Amino acid sequence: MSDSQDYLPSYLRVLILGMLIPGIVFSALVLMAFAYAASQRRSRPHLHRVSFRLLVYALVSNFILGVTLIPMETLMTGPISPAGCTFAAFASNASLLFSACMYFCMALNLQLVLIHGVNGLMMEKYYVIGSSLLVGVCNITPLAVGGQFGLYDDLCWFSNPDPVLRFRWMVGTQSFWLFLMASSELVCFVLLMSYMLRRWMFVKRIRSEISTEMTPSQQAPILQFRAIILRITLYPLLSCVLGFSGTTVDLYLAKHLENTELKVQLTVLDQCIFNARPFLYAVLAATDPSFLCAIRALRNLHPSAGSDGSQQASNTVKSQSLSSHSTTSSSDTRTLADGDNAEGDNMVRQSLDAAARPQTQTETVVNHTCTHRDPEKGIERHSSVFESRRDSIEFQI
Protein backbone atom coordinates (compact mmCIF):
# COMPACT_ATOMS: atom_id res chain seq x y z
CA MET A 1 0.00 0.00 0.00
CA SER A 2 2.83 2.37 0.78
CA ASP A 3 4.25 1.90 -2.70
CA SER A 4 0.88 2.71 -4.22
CA GLN A 5 0.57 5.85 -2.15
CA ASP A 6 4.03 7.02 -3.15
CA TYR A 7 3.25 6.39 -6.81
CA LEU A 8 -0.23 7.91 -6.79
CA PRO A 9 0.60 11.67 -6.87
CA SER A 10 2.84 11.54 -9.97
CA TYR A 11 0.47 9.15 -11.70
CA LEU A 12 -2.51 11.40 -11.02
CA ARG A 13 -0.70 14.49 -12.32
CA VAL A 14 0.04 12.83 -15.66
CA LEU A 15 -3.48 11.41 -15.93
CA ILE A 16 -5.25 14.64 -15.06
CA LEU A 17 -3.09 16.75 -17.36
CA GLY A 18 -3.78 14.29 -20.17
CA MET A 19 -7.53 14.87 -19.79
CA LEU A 20 -7.70 18.51 -18.73
CA ILE A 21 -5.49 20.10 -21.37
CA PRO A 22 -7.27 18.51 -24.39
CA GLY A 23 -10.63 19.30 -22.77
CA ILE A 24 -9.76 22.96 -22.19
CA VAL A 25 -8.31 23.44 -25.68
CA PHE A 26 -11.17 21.62 -27.42
CA SER A 27 -13.80 23.53 -25.41
CA ALA A 28 -12.18 26.83 -26.38
CA LEU A 29 -12.14 25.82 -30.06
CA VAL A 30 -15.79 24.76 -30.00
CA LEU A 31 -16.85 28.00 -28.30
CA MET A 32 -14.95 30.05 -30.89
CA ALA A 33 -16.65 28.07 -33.66
CA PHE A 34 -20.02 28.77 -32.04
CA ALA A 35 -19.20 32.47 -31.86
CA TYR A 36 -18.21 32.57 -35.53
CA ALA A 37 -21.37 30.74 -36.63
CA ALA A 38 -23.51 33.08 -34.52
CA SER A 39 -21.85 36.13 -36.10
CA GLN A 40 -22.80 35.07 -39.63
CA ARG A 41 -26.24 36.06 -40.86
CA ARG A 42 -26.93 32.84 -42.76
CA SER A 43 -25.92 30.47 -40.01
CA ARG A 44 -27.35 32.46 -37.10
CA PRO A 45 -31.01 31.35 -37.56
CA HIS A 46 -29.99 27.70 -37.21
CA LEU A 47 -28.63 28.42 -33.73
CA HIS A 48 -31.89 29.92 -32.50
CA ARG A 49 -32.84 27.03 -30.24
CA VAL A 50 -33.30 26.91 -26.47
CA SER A 51 -31.25 23.74 -26.05
CA PHE A 52 -28.35 25.24 -27.98
CA ARG A 53 -28.18 28.34 -25.80
CA LEU A 54 -28.31 26.18 -22.68
CA LEU A 55 -25.51 24.13 -24.19
CA VAL A 56 -23.38 27.24 -24.67
CA TYR A 57 -23.88 28.22 -21.02
CA ALA A 58 -22.93 24.72 -19.92
CA LEU A 59 -19.89 24.61 -22.20
CA VAL A 60 -18.59 27.92 -20.83
CA SER A 61 -19.10 26.55 -17.32
CA ASN A 62 -17.20 23.38 -18.20
CA PHE A 63 -14.37 25.46 -19.65
CA ILE A 64 -14.13 27.38 -16.37
CA LEU A 65 -14.23 24.06 -14.50
CA GLY A 66 -11.31 22.72 -16.51
CA VAL A 67 -9.24 25.85 -15.91
CA THR A 68 -9.89 25.87 -12.16
CA LEU A 69 -9.24 22.15 -11.76
CA ILE A 70 -5.56 22.65 -12.62
CA PRO A 71 -4.65 24.55 -9.42
CA MET A 72 -7.30 22.58 -7.53
CA GLU A 73 -5.42 19.34 -8.17
CA THR A 74 -2.09 20.95 -7.20
CA LEU A 75 -0.69 20.60 -10.71
CA MET A 76 1.08 23.95 -10.47
CA THR A 77 4.78 23.81 -9.67
CA GLY A 78 4.82 26.17 -6.73
CA PRO A 79 2.75 26.25 -3.52
CA ILE A 80 -0.78 27.65 -3.78
CA SER A 81 -1.73 30.58 -1.55
CA PRO A 82 -4.71 30.09 0.80
CA ALA A 83 -6.70 32.76 -1.03
CA GLY A 84 -5.95 31.21 -4.43
CA CYS A 85 -6.89 27.75 -3.17
CA THR A 86 -10.16 29.06 -1.72
CA PHE A 87 -11.04 30.77 -4.98
CA ALA A 88 -10.18 27.63 -6.98
CA ALA A 89 -12.45 25.51 -4.79
CA PHE A 90 -15.28 28.06 -5.03
CA ALA A 91 -15.00 28.47 -8.82
CA SER A 92 -14.75 24.75 -9.53
CA ASN A 93 -17.73 23.84 -7.35
CA ALA A 94 -19.82 26.68 -8.76
CA SER A 95 -19.03 25.85 -12.39
CA LEU A 96 -19.65 22.14 -11.80
CA LEU A 97 -23.06 22.76 -10.26
CA PHE A 98 -24.08 25.33 -12.89
CA SER A 99 -23.13 22.94 -15.68
CA ALA A 100 -25.25 20.20 -14.11
CA CYS A 101 -28.15 22.65 -13.82
CA MET A 102 -27.98 23.52 -17.51
CA TYR A 103 -28.08 19.89 -18.62
CA PHE A 104 -30.96 19.22 -16.26
CA CYS A 105 -32.81 22.20 -17.76
CA MET A 106 -32.33 20.66 -21.22
CA ALA A 107 -34.11 17.49 -20.12
CA LEU A 108 -36.80 19.46 -18.29
CA ASN A 109 -37.39 21.75 -21.26
CA LEU A 110 -37.97 18.81 -23.61
CA GLN A 111 -40.62 17.40 -21.31
CA LEU A 112 -42.35 20.75 -20.71
CA VAL A 113 -42.47 21.66 -24.41
CA LEU A 114 -43.30 18.30 -25.98
CA ILE A 115 -45.56 16.77 -23.33
CA HIS A 116 -47.11 19.70 -21.46
CA GLY A 117 -47.20 22.31 -24.24
CA VAL A 118 -45.19 24.96 -22.36
CA ASN A 119 -43.40 27.58 -24.43
CA GLY A 120 -39.66 26.88 -24.16
CA LEU A 121 -38.68 30.39 -25.26
CA MET A 122 -40.65 31.84 -22.37
CA MET A 123 -39.13 29.39 -19.86
CA GLU A 124 -35.53 29.95 -20.91
CA LYS A 125 -34.93 32.92 -18.66
CA TYR A 126 -36.34 31.04 -15.68
CA TYR A 127 -33.90 28.19 -16.33
CA VAL A 128 -30.93 30.55 -16.17
CA ILE A 129 -32.21 32.62 -13.23
CA GLY A 130 -33.15 29.58 -11.14
CA SER A 131 -29.83 27.84 -11.83
CA SER A 132 -27.87 30.98 -10.96
CA LEU A 133 -29.73 31.41 -7.68
CA LEU A 134 -29.14 27.79 -6.69
CA VAL A 135 -25.44 27.98 -7.54
CA GLY A 136 -25.08 31.24 -5.63
CA VAL A 137 -26.75 29.94 -2.48
CA CYS A 138 -24.83 26.65 -2.50
CA ASN A 139 -21.41 28.27 -2.98
CA ILE A 140 -21.59 31.74 -1.45
CA THR A 141 -22.91 30.33 1.84
CA PRO A 142 -19.86 28.13 2.64
CA LEU A 143 -17.59 30.91 1.40
CA ALA A 144 -19.28 33.45 3.70
CA VAL A 145 -19.20 31.16 6.72
CA GLY A 146 -15.44 30.83 6.36
CA GLY A 147 -13.17 27.85 6.69
CA GLN A 148 -15.23 25.61 4.42
CA PHE A 149 -13.14 26.03 1.25
CA GLY A 150 -9.41 25.59 1.23
CA LEU A 151 -6.56 23.08 1.11
CA TYR A 152 -7.41 19.58 2.31
CA ASP A 153 -5.54 16.36 1.54
CA ASP A 154 -3.55 18.12 -1.23
CA LEU A 155 -6.79 19.29 -2.83
CA CYS A 156 -8.49 22.68 -2.99
CA TRP A 157 -11.90 21.56 -1.83
CA PHE A 158 -14.03 21.43 1.33
CA SER A 159 -11.47 21.90 4.10
CA ASN A 160 -13.35 21.75 7.41
CA PRO A 161 -11.07 19.87 9.85
CA ASP A 162 -14.08 18.08 11.34
CA PRO A 163 -14.89 15.08 9.07
CA VAL A 164 -18.57 15.11 10.05
CA LEU A 165 -19.04 18.82 9.30
CA ARG A 166 -17.05 18.53 6.09
CA PHE A 167 -19.29 15.67 4.96
CA ARG A 168 -22.43 17.69 5.74
CA TRP A 169 -21.22 20.72 3.84
CA MET A 170 -20.28 18.58 0.86
CA VAL A 171 -23.66 16.84 0.76
CA GLY A 172 -25.75 19.95 1.38
CA THR A 173 -24.03 22.24 -1.13
CA GLN A 174 -22.94 19.86 -3.88
CA SER A 175 -23.54 16.09 -3.75
CA PHE A 176 -27.26 16.24 -2.97
CA TRP A 177 -27.99 18.61 -5.85
CA LEU A 178 -25.87 16.71 -8.34
CA PHE A 179 -27.57 13.46 -7.38
CA LEU A 180 -31.02 15.09 -7.53
CA MET A 181 -30.40 16.50 -11.00
CA ALA A 182 -29.03 13.20 -12.28
CA SER A 183 -32.14 11.41 -10.99
CA SER A 184 -34.44 14.05 -12.50
CA GLU A 185 -32.68 13.79 -15.86
CA LEU A 186 -33.24 10.04 -15.86
CA VAL A 187 -36.93 10.48 -14.98
CA CYS A 188 -37.42 13.10 -17.73
CA PHE A 189 -35.74 10.83 -20.27
CA VAL A 190 -37.93 7.84 -19.37
CA LEU A 191 -41.12 9.93 -19.49
CA LEU A 192 -40.17 11.48 -22.82
CA MET A 193 -39.32 8.14 -24.44
CA SER A 194 -42.52 6.53 -23.17
CA TYR A 195 -44.59 9.46 -24.46
CA MET A 196 -42.87 9.30 -27.84
CA LEU A 197 -43.55 5.57 -28.05
CA ARG A 198 -47.22 6.04 -27.17
CA ARG A 199 -47.63 8.76 -29.81
CA TRP A 200 -45.92 6.62 -32.43
CA MET A 201 -48.18 3.64 -31.68
CA PHE A 202 -51.27 5.87 -31.71
CA VAL A 203 -50.41 7.48 -35.05
CA LYS A 204 -49.58 4.08 -36.53
CA ARG A 205 -52.96 2.71 -35.47
CA ILE A 206 -54.88 5.71 -36.86
CA ARG A 207 -52.92 5.59 -40.11
CA SER A 208 -53.69 1.91 -40.58
CA GLU A 209 -57.40 2.59 -40.10
CA ILE A 210 -57.51 5.35 -42.71
CA SER A 211 -55.00 3.63 -45.03
CA THR A 212 -53.04 6.73 -45.97
CA GLU A 213 -49.63 8.22 -45.41
CA MET A 214 -48.89 11.24 -43.24
CA THR A 215 -46.72 14.07 -44.44
CA PRO A 216 -44.06 15.38 -42.03
CA SER A 217 -46.09 18.53 -41.30
CA GLN A 218 -49.09 16.41 -40.22
CA GLN A 219 -47.16 14.37 -37.67
CA ALA A 220 -47.02 15.17 -33.99
CA PRO A 221 -44.06 17.48 -33.20
CA ILE A 222 -42.45 14.87 -30.97
CA LEU A 223 -42.38 12.51 -33.96
CA GLN A 224 -41.57 15.12 -36.57
CA PHE A 225 -38.41 16.23 -34.71
CA ARG A 226 -37.61 12.86 -33.11
CA ALA A 227 -34.07 12.75 -34.54
CA ILE A 228 -33.20 16.15 -33.04
CA ILE A 229 -34.91 15.29 -29.77
CA LEU A 230 -33.03 12.02 -29.39
CA ARG A 231 -29.75 13.81 -30.11
CA ILE A 232 -30.44 16.52 -27.52
CA THR A 233 -31.16 13.88 -24.87
CA LEU A 234 -27.53 12.74 -25.07
CA TYR A 235 -26.47 15.78 -23.02
CA PRO A 236 -28.62 15.04 -19.93
CA LEU A 237 -27.91 11.31 -20.29
CA LEU A 238 -24.15 11.90 -20.10
CA SER A 239 -24.71 14.32 -17.21
CA CYS A 240 -26.80 11.66 -15.48
CA VAL A 241 -24.06 9.02 -15.80
CA LEU A 242 -21.31 11.37 -14.62
CA GLY A 243 -23.47 12.77 -11.82
CA PHE A 244 -24.43 9.39 -10.40
CA SER A 245 -20.93 7.93 -10.59
CA GLY A 246 -19.05 11.01 -9.38
CA THR A 247 -21.39 11.70 -6.46
CA THR A 248 -21.36 8.07 -5.31
CA VAL A 249 -17.55 7.89 -5.35
CA ASP A 250 -17.24 11.26 -3.56
CA LEU A 251 -19.58 10.21 -0.78
CA TYR A 252 -17.75 6.92 -0.30
CA LEU A 253 -14.36 8.62 -0.11
CA ALA A 254 -15.71 11.21 2.35
CA LYS A 255 -17.10 8.51 4.68
CA HIS A 256 -14.12 6.12 4.50
CA LEU A 257 -11.01 8.00 5.54
CA GLU A 258 -8.73 4.99 6.05
CA ASN A 259 -5.97 4.38 3.52
CA THR A 260 -6.72 1.25 1.54
CA GLU A 261 -6.00 -0.04 -1.93
CA LEU A 262 -9.68 0.41 -2.81
CA LYS A 263 -9.53 4.07 -1.81
CA VAL A 264 -6.53 4.61 -4.05
CA GLN A 265 -8.37 3.07 -7.00
CA LEU A 266 -11.55 5.04 -6.30
CA THR A 267 -9.52 8.24 -6.05
CA VAL A 268 -8.13 7.65 -9.53
CA LEU A 269 -11.63 6.90 -10.81
CA ASP A 270 -13.02 10.03 -9.17
CA GLN A 271 -10.36 12.21 -10.79
CA CYS A 272 -11.08 10.67 -14.20
CA ILE A 273 -14.82 11.31 -13.87
CA PHE A 274 -14.54 14.97 -12.98
CA ASN A 275 -11.56 15.91 -15.15
CA ALA A 276 -12.94 14.25 -18.29
CA ARG A 277 -16.10 16.39 -18.22
CA PRO A 278 -14.80 19.31 -20.34
CA PHE A 279 -13.54 17.02 -23.10
CA LEU A 280 -16.62 14.75 -23.23
CA TYR A 281 -19.09 17.63 -23.34
CA ALA A 282 -16.98 19.47 -25.94
CA VAL A 283 -17.11 16.40 -28.20
CA LEU A 284 -20.91 16.27 -27.92
CA ALA A 285 -21.21 20.03 -28.46
CA ALA A 286 -19.12 19.84 -31.64
CA THR A 287 -21.69 17.45 -33.14
CA ASP A 288 -24.79 19.34 -32.00
CA PRO A 289 -27.52 19.28 -34.70
CA SER A 290 -28.01 23.07 -34.60
CA PHE A 291 -24.29 23.68 -35.07
CA LEU A 292 -24.05 21.16 -37.90
CA CYS A 293 -26.97 22.86 -39.69
CA ALA A 294 -25.22 26.21 -39.28
CA ILE A 295 -22.00 24.79 -40.73
CA ARG A 296 -23.88 23.37 -43.73
CA ALA A 297 -25.50 26.76 -44.27
CA LEU A 298 -22.07 28.40 -44.34
CA ARG A 299 -20.65 25.82 -46.73
CA ASN A 300 -23.58 26.11 -49.14
CA LEU A 301 -23.30 29.87 -49.68
CA HIS A 302 -24.39 30.93 -53.16
CA PRO A 303 -21.81 33.09 -54.92
CA SER A 304 -24.42 35.68 -55.85
CA ALA A 305 -25.57 36.06 -52.25
CA GLY A 306 -24.11 39.16 -50.68
CA SER A 307 -23.18 39.71 -47.09
CA ASP A 308 -26.23 41.87 -46.54
CA GLY A 309 -28.55 38.88 -46.78
CA SER A 310 -30.28 39.93 -50.00
CA GLN A 311 -30.86 36.31 -51.01
CA GLN A 312 -32.46 35.56 -47.65
CA ALA A 313 -34.70 38.60 -47.98
CA SER A 314 -35.72 37.46 -51.46
CA ASN A 315 -36.64 34.04 -50.13
CA THR A 316 -38.67 35.65 -47.38
CA VAL A 317 -40.62 37.74 -49.89
CA LYS A 318 -41.32 34.68 -52.00
CA SER A 319 -42.53 32.79 -48.96
CA GLN A 320 -44.84 35.62 -47.96
CA SER A 321 -46.21 35.81 -51.51
CA LEU A 322 -46.99 32.11 -51.51
CA SER A 323 -48.55 32.42 -48.09
CA SER A 324 -50.89 35.20 -49.20
CA HIS A 325 -52.40 33.00 -51.96
CA SER A 326 -52.85 29.88 -49.82
CA THR A 327 -56.09 29.03 -48.09
CA THR A 328 -56.41 27.74 -44.57
CA SER A 329 -58.89 25.15 -43.44
CA SER A 330 -59.54 23.08 -40.36
CA SER A 331 -57.62 20.21 -41.86
CA ASP A 332 -54.42 22.30 -42.01
CA THR A 333 -53.89 22.42 -38.28
CA ARG A 334 -51.08 21.36 -36.06
CA THR A 335 -50.58 21.31 -32.32
CA LEU A 336 -47.57 21.76 -30.07
CA ALA A 337 -48.41 18.99 -27.65
CA ASP A 338 -50.90 16.34 -28.76
CA GLY A 339 -52.62 14.62 -25.84
CA ASP A 340 -54.23 11.24 -25.88
CA ASN A 341 -57.70 12.71 -25.40
CA ALA A 342 -60.58 12.71 -27.85
CA GLU A 343 -59.78 16.16 -29.16
CA GLY A 344 -56.28 15.10 -30.12
CA ASP A 345 -57.67 12.00 -31.88
CA ASN A 346 -60.03 14.13 -33.97
CA MET A 347 -57.18 16.42 -34.97
CA VAL A 348 -55.07 13.54 -36.22
CA ARG A 349 -58.01 11.95 -38.03
CA GLN A 350 -58.83 15.24 -39.78
CA SER A 351 -55.23 15.60 -40.91
CA LEU A 352 -55.18 12.06 -42.26
CA ASP A 353 -58.49 12.57 -44.05
CA ALA A 354 -57.11 15.69 -45.65
CA ALA A 355 -54.03 13.78 -46.82
CA ALA A 356 -56.27 11.18 -48.49
CA ARG A 357 -58.11 13.81 -50.56
CA PRO A 358 -56.54 15.49 -53.61
CA GLN A 359 -55.26 18.95 -52.83
CA THR A 360 -54.88 21.91 -55.15
CA GLN A 361 -51.95 23.25 -53.19
CA THR A 362 -48.43 21.99 -52.97
CA GLU A 363 -46.87 21.06 -49.65
CA THR A 364 -44.57 24.06 -49.91
CA VAL A 365 -47.49 26.48 -50.04
CA VAL A 366 -49.26 24.82 -47.10
CA ASN A 367 -46.19 24.91 -44.92
CA HIS A 368 -45.83 28.65 -45.43
CA THR A 369 -49.30 29.36 -44.06
CA CYS A 370 -48.58 30.69 -40.61
CA THR A 371 -49.76 33.15 -38.04
CA HIS A 372 -47.19 35.32 -36.28
CA ARG A 373 -47.68 35.30 -32.53
CA ASP A 374 -45.94 36.72 -29.52
CA PRO A 375 -42.91 34.50 -28.73
CA GLU A 376 -43.66 34.89 -25.03
CA LYS A 377 -47.18 33.45 -25.43
CA GLY A 378 -46.44 30.63 -27.84
CA ILE A 379 -49.14 28.48 -29.45
CA GLU A 380 -52.08 27.37 -27.40
CA ARG A 381 -52.73 23.68 -26.88
CA HIS A 382 -54.61 22.21 -29.89
CA SER A 383 -54.43 25.56 -31.66
CA SER A 384 -56.01 25.79 -35.12
CA VAL A 385 -53.23 27.89 -36.63
CA PHE A 386 -49.74 27.18 -37.77
CA GLU A 387 -47.03 28.52 -35.54
CA SER A 388 -44.68 30.94 -37.21
CA ARG A 389 -41.12 30.04 -38.08
CA ARG A 390 -39.74 31.81 -35.04
CA ASP A 391 -42.38 30.42 -32.68
CA SER A 392 -42.19 26.85 -34.00
CA ILE A 393 -41.47 23.97 -31.71
CA GLU A 394 -38.13 23.44 -33.44
CA PHE A 395 -36.84 26.59 -31.73
CA GLN A 396 -38.42 25.80 -28.35
CA ILE A 397 -36.75 22.43 -27.78
Image (cartoon, helix red, strand yellow):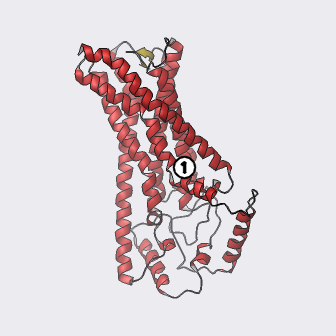
Task: Say which of 135 and 89 sits in front.
Answer: 89
Query: In the image, residue 385 lies at what x, y percent?
Result: 58, 71
The residue located at (30%, 24%) in the rendering is 253
Residue annotated with mark 1: 52
Query: In the image, residue 208 lies at what x, y percent?
Result: 35, 80
For badge 1, the amino acid type reads: Phe
Q: Is residue 397 visible?
A: yes
Query: In the image, residue 142 lies at what x, y percent?
Result: 47, 21
Task: Say which of 136 and 217 sits in front.
Answer: 217
State the image quarter where residue 364 is shown: bottom right
Q: Is residue 74 above or below residue 372?
A: above
The residue located at (27%, 18%) in the rendering is 4
Q: Secondary structure at mark 1?
A: helix
Task: Say which of 167 and 292 sits in front.
Answer: 292
Q: Is residue 84 above or below residue 208?
A: above
Q: Quadrant of the N terminus?
A: top left
Query: In the image, residue 41 lies at what x, y percent?
Result: 69, 54
The residue located at (71%, 62%) in the rendering is 303
Q: Is residue 166 above or below residue 250?
A: above
Q: Residues within 10 Å of mark 1 (few under 14, many from 20)?
A: many
Q: In the picture provided, is 40 more to the left or to the right than 118?
A: right
Q: Is residue 134 visible?
A: no
